[in-house]
Image (cartoon, rainbow, N blue to C red):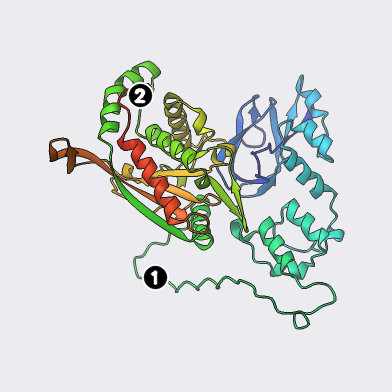
Amino acid sequence: MAEYKLLLPSMGEGVMEATIISWLFNEGDQVNEDDSVVEIATDKVDSDVPTPVSGKIVKILKQKDEVAKIGEAIAVLEVSGAGEALAEQPQEPKSAGEVETQIPNVEPDVVKGLEEALHSSAAATGFAGSDRYLSPLVKSIAQQENISENELQSIKGSGLEGRITKEDILTFVANRPKAGTTPAAETPTPVVVQAPKPAAAPVKIGAGDEIIQMDRVRKIIADAMVNSKHTAPHVTSFIESDVTNVVKWRTKHKDIFEKREGEKLTYMPIFVKAIVKAIQDFPMINVSVDGDKIIKKKNINIGMATAMPDGNLIVPVIKNADQLSLSGLAKAINDLAFRARNKKLKPEETQGATYTISNVGGFGNLMGTPIIPQPQVAILAVGAIVKKPAVLETKDGDVIAIRNLMFMSHSYDHRVVDGSLGGMFLKHVHDYLENWDMNTEI
């Protein structure tokens, strides 16, 4: 018999840690290879961690609500037979090479971060007593810039639960007084300072009022929405589209598609196809902002806001949507939506979106003013499709007819998207939908 340490596997690019939600087995329980043994949560998504070996759980190292870093041991298993070879692996990763041996799918950036964290001594950093969580990258920057513990404590973090991000510490370094000088001795330079957030007015609790604690996901959503409003000046444009051709085309093909593919044909792949075409017409919508730089994205990855059964929201991402056919989009959308609602998404499937669509019409709403998911610069909301009388221009004059109409609202970041670009993009989406080709193949 030998011991095998179950390590927290890589959760995708940019994810360095996860919180233990619950253990699916107890100490002393026997588990089989590929059994999901623990539920974890990252800033992006909840998921399960399977065990790569069979054995008995002899010790749980990370309890519920505790945080584990990528590559860190979270449990010890007692294994035998084929498991003995696995148990001979190093108990703790000591270097990048050993990390790669134990977790072959760890991203290079993650390995680098682990190596920096393992080789950085508390004495060298000068903030061994700090009780704030600091990522390996932030620790490395703090060490290189000789930032003291007092200075570190003074930095207001913009990350989850007030954590210091890379941008926070680099901003601090850029505005930090140089050694041997004092602020009074330096030549004053104009600095743009954000106004402090107004303190929320105290809420009076009346008799019979119920207090409900936000869950972890709701806190993340709340922080993200507030951060987006503080980061990007939002502008929203509206347009009403005649989607009668789209409705007729879908009615004609939905039963054939479901019989052939075993899947439903919704309106979403049609909307996504129109968005992709409009992005190709106006690629400066498919960008992000980094300080005074605009990052023009090569890939077109469409985020799809999805309501969860518990009332929370998650945004799975259709990667390289421009490379998918209409049928491929339909299958990808159905798969992502199903797994999102059943908490089966992988963390990387919620990352990397370059543009997002939100279907407020699914709740019977005509329109909405969506908030931009950072670091994207635009988001489209589609409303309910409603039959209305509309004026049609014909060669014999104007007539009134019953048409299927839908409002769309386009929110965009006015730092880099002006009204002309934001409006023209929306008009192109509108045109693609209004002029939908009834002969389109599915």
Q: Is residue 322 visible?
A: yes
Answer left or right for 64 relative to 318: right
Q: Is residue 365 above or below residue 3?
A: below
Seen at 71% across and 61% down, the residue is 169
Residue 307 on image: x %, y %: 41, 43
Question: What is the x, y in percent for residue 377?
Answer: 51, 51
Which residue was labeled with disc 2?
Answer: 440
Residue drawn at (75%, 83%) of the image: 184
Residue where numbered disc 1 is placed: 205
The answer to which image quadrant residue 24 occupies is top right
Q: Is residue 131 left or right of residue 218?
A: right
Q: Quadrant of residue 37?
A: top right
Instruction: Indicate the position of residue 250 as horizontal and vertical percent values.
Output: 30, 28
In the rendered structure, which amino acid carries the disc numbered 1? Ile
User: Which of the pair 62/365 is nearer the observer?
Assistant: 365
| Residue at the (69%, 56%) spot, across then down | 166
Furthest residue in direction top, as rendered: 260
* In the rendered image, the vertical position of residue 49 relative to residue 380, given as above or below: above
Nearer the observer: mark 2 or 1; the answer is 2
Is residue 174 toward the left or the right of residue 256 in the image?
right
Badge 1 density bin: few <14, some 14–19, many ≥20, Cα 10 Å: few
Callout 2, which amino acid?
Answer: Thr
What secondary structure is found at the residue carrying circle 2?
loop
Which type of secondary structure does the marked residue at label 1 adopt?
loop
Residue depicted at 65% across the width and 44% down the height: 15
Q: Could you tell which of marks 2 and 1 lies nearer the N-terminus?
A: 1
Q: Position of residue 50 (x, y in %)?
A: 63, 31
Identify which residue, 289 or 49, lies in the foreground: 289
**Circle 2 Cα neighbour tier, 10 Å, few/some/many (<14 / 14–19 / ≥20):** few
